[in-house]
Image (tube, rainbow, N blue to C red):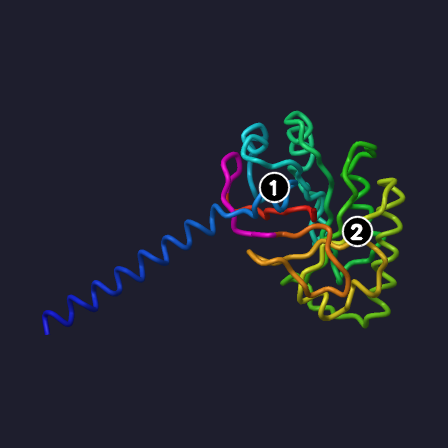
């Protein structure tokens, strides 16, 4: 009996060690620079105070900064993050989280009153995903109409076409790729996504990467070569 318990204990220890090794690997993983030369992060006030020089030195070429969340709250760290990204010499852009529960004009106002006009900025991003606090599920025609309104207002302010960051479940529900003629940014931990009806130009390769210069996990993004 003692030998059996020892073997069980040893087996469990091996499994635990392997799980720890995989977790540590996942925390630090990023796609190959040879395949994806341009990589970067999505940053918001959830990440706390960011050491932008350190983040740039760790290989972040660009940063998308949340301007407003799906509840309409303007991100309180946006201005500080914008200054930091600029000072670090990184390329930067602004992101708004879309809500199915709010009027597109109200959402655009949150973006426009947070994000200054800036010809040097990257194209604005509209993040499309289901959020826990919103249960609304409008029909596809209504969703596309609302989204087009928001896109037009955001693009008019930014002076350049928007990029749509679409989660897999949102795209399956509304087929954004075939309904809106805009460039797509898709999600997929560790494996390139293939769920949209047209190719992506950006990919969130990991939403669990830990990197020096920023608290907690970040969404690590790559640009299609």
| 209 falls in the magenta region | yes
| 33 falls in the magenta region | no
Pinpoint residue 164: horizontal percent, then vertical percent.
76, 54
Real-space Cα separation, disc 2 to disc 1, in angstroms: 18 Å
Which one is nearer the viewer's eye here, 46 or 9? 9
29 vs 60, left or right, is left
Q: Residue at x 70, y 34 (%)?
A: 91
- Image mark count: 2
In the figure, 183 relative to 2: above or below? above
User: Could you tell which of marks 2 and 1 lies nearer the N-terminus?
Assistant: 1
Pinpoint residue 41: horizontal percent, then vertical percent.
62, 42
Region in magenta: 205-215
Disc assigned to residue 107: 2
In the figure, 97 relative to 197: above or below? above
Which one is nearer the viewer's eye here, 141 or 132? 141
Picture quadrant where residue 61 is located = top right
Quarter in which the N terminus is drawn: bottom left
| Secondary structure at numbered mark 2 | helix
Q: Residue at x 85, y 52 (%)?
A: 151
Q: Report which residue position mark 1 lands on.
A: 45
141 vs 127, left or right, is right
152 vs 176, left or right, is right
| Secondary structure at numbered mark 1 | helix
């Amino acid at each position: 009996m003692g030998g059996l318990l020892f073997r069980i204990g040893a087996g469990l220890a091996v499994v635990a060690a392997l799980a720890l090794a995989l977790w540590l690997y996942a925390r630090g993983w990023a796609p190959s620079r040879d395949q994806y030369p341009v990589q970067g992060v999505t940053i918001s006030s959830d990440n706390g105070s960011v050491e932008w020089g350190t983040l740039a030195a760790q290989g972040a070429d660009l940063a998308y900064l949340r301007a407003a969340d799906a509840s309409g709250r303007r991100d309180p760290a946006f201005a500080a993050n914008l200054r930091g990204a600029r000072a670090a010499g990184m390329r930067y852009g602004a992101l708004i989280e879309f809500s199915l529960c709010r009027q597109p004009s109200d959402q655009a106002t949150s973006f426009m009153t947070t994000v200054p006009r800036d010809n040097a900025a990257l194209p604005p991003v509209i993040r499309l995903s289901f959020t826990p606090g919103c249960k609304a599920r409008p029909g596809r025609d209504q969703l596309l109409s609302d989204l087009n309104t928001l896109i037009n207002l955001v693009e008019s302010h930014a002076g350049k076409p928007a990029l749509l960051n679409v989660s897999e479940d949102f795209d399956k529900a509304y087929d954004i790729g075939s309904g809106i003629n805009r460039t797509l940014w898709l999600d997929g931990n560790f494996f390139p996504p293939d769920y949209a009806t047209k190719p992506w130009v950006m990919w969130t390769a990991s939403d669990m990467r830990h990197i020096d210069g920023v608290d907690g996990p970040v969404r690590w993004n790559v640009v299609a070569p």
